[in-house]
Image: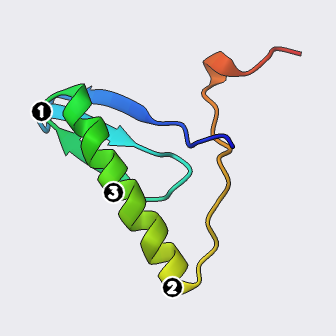
């Protein structure tokens, strides 16, 4: 099974790294390093999925692909 795409970027405003999963609305995390942001995002992802399941909400399939990975036709 495919997993969700993760973005990690540095935020000058926050003074650290932000990691997010575009397919899971509002699922993001902060860390002082890219590795810490990713670790925190894994925790946030698990909590997001658990909350959606408990609420009976649909869990979106992984769909987001950055343009750089999309084949040109």
Classify residue 31 as left or right of residue 41.
Answer: left
| Residue 60 point in image, percent of width and height | 64, 60
Where does the image place residue 5, in percent across and percent down from the top left? 54, 37
Where is residue 71, by image quadrant? top right
Do callouts 2 and 3 mark residues in contact (Cβ within 8 Å)?
no
Placement of 47 over or under 7, stated as above or below:
below
How would you rate the neighbour count of disc 1 (Cα within 10 Å): few for under 14, some for 14-19, many for 20 or more?
few
| Location of mark 3 (residue) | 44
Q: Residue furthest right?
A: 73
Image quarter of residue 46 = bottom left
Location of residue 72 in the rendering, given as x and y in whole percent from the top left corner = 82, 14
Element class at badge 3: helix
Residue 32's disc is 1
Residues at marks 2 and 3, CA–CA distance in whole angstroms: 16 Å
Q: Is residue 57 above or below residue 38?
A: below
Give the labeled residue for mark 2: 55
What's the distance in space between the residues labelled 1 and 3, CA to CA?
A: 16 Å
Looking at marks 1 and 2 on the same chain, the residue that comes earlier in the sequence is marked by: 1
What scheme was used to colour the molecule?
rainbow
- Which secondary structure, mark 2? helix
Q: Residue at x 35, y 30 (%)?
A: 8
Q: Are marks 1 and 3 in contact (CB under 8 Å)?
A: no
Relative to the observer, which residue lies in front, 66 or 36?
36
Q: Which mark is residue 72?
A: none
**Distance of label 1 from label 2 (alpha carbons):** 32 Å
């Amino acid at each position: 099974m495919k997993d969700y795409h993760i973005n990690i970027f540095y935020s000058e405003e926050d003074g650290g790294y932000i990691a997010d999963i575009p397919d899971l609305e509002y699922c993001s995390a902060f860390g002082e390093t890219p590795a810490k942001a990713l670790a925190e995002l894994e925790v946030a992802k698990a909590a997001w999925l658990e909350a959606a399941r408990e609420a009976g909400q649909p869990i979106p399939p992984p769909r987001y692909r950055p343009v750089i990975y999309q084949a040109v036709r």
